[in-house]
Image (cartoon, rainbow, N blue to C red):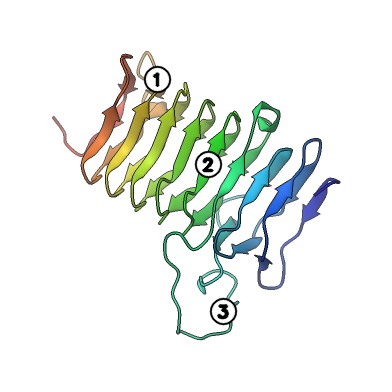
Amino acid sequence: LYNSASLPPPITAYVAIDNVTVNSGTTLLIQPTTVVKLLPNKYLYIYGTLTARASEGNEIVFTSFKDDEYGGDTNADGNSTSPAPNDWGYLYPIGMGRSGSVIDYAIIRYGQYGIYDSGSDLTIRNSDISSSYYDGIYVYNASPSITGNTIESNRRYGIYLDSSSSILTNNSIKKNNNYGDYLTGASQPTIGSDPPELSNWNDIFANGTYNLYNNTSNDIIATPVYWGTLE
């Protein structure tokens, strides 16, 4: 994409048969209810700005070519195939110049990752991110705003933070196979708020091994959080 563009809702779905790149200095605007299906090992590279802003009931969908639930039977094989984790790559914002990007009310599922953020302080909110082969959200050397999301049933971690100071509020992070949140490197996120405010509550529970694993030397603020117990 060398010039800014708007992607309106299709009759059924857009299919990315190759990598899609939003170049620096351009904006890709994706309209509500748009369905984007990606083939194996295909990625949405974001060097410019991605604006994927929708509303409840009108979500934007990023999913597998085999996913018949959204956009219909795009691969025209009836029930012969079913979607699965690792069916496509991931959304890949790269670099600080992408920090104006917004993903709001999206459904992202069946990728290698949901969102792989390298250096971009984008906004991720009100979205459902599930069934990734690795992590729902992977962050390296960036501090995106992560608010109001449901991040569940990913094969490794819900959120992986490496050298990140993200603020996490109002998220439901559950049923991920290993950890809910995994922190490493120089990460020092705020999970909730300091002082605690109920309006910033996170639910982090029912994850396979640990709900939160802090592999850093930093103290972490994690309150208020529901850990799946009233203790």
Q: Position of residue 48 (x, y in %)?
A: 74, 38
Could you say which quadrant of the image residue 10 lies in?
Answer: bottom right
Residue 120: x and y, percent?
61, 30
Instruction: Name the amino acid type tagged 3.
Output: Asp
**Residue drawn where x is 74% and y is 45% of the image:** 22
Q: At 60% from the left edge and 50% from the top edge, which residue is drawn?
A: 55
| Residue 195 appears anywhere in the view | yes
The relative height of residue 217 versus residue 136 in the rendered view (above or below) is above
Amino acid carrying label 2: it is: Tyr
Circle nearer the N terminus (2, 3): 3
Is 128 left or right of 102, judged from the image as shown? Answer: left
Q: Which mark is residue 193?
A: 1
Q: Is residue 51 above or below residue 36?
A: above
How far apart are the alpha carbons under marks 3 and 1? 44 Å
Closer-to-camera residue (195/2): 2
Q: Estimate how packed mark 1 is, as few (under 14), some (14 to 19) or many (20 or more) residues with alpha carbons within 10 Å.
A: many
Q: Which mark is residue 116?
A: 2
Label 2 crowding class (10 Å Cα cut-off): few <14, some 14-19, many 20+?
A: many
Name the quadrant containing residue 94: top right
Image position, residue 8 (x, y; %): 76, 59
At mark 3, the secondary structure is loop
Whichever of callouts 3 and 1 sits on the residue coming sooner in the sequence is 3
Q: Give the mark nearer the N terminus: 1 vs 2.
A: 2
Q: Amino acid at mark 1?
A: Ser
SS of the residue under disc 1: loop
Give the residue pinned by disc 3: 73
Q: Nearer the viewer, residue 105 or 37?
A: 37
Q: Which is nearer the eye, 114 or 118? A: 118
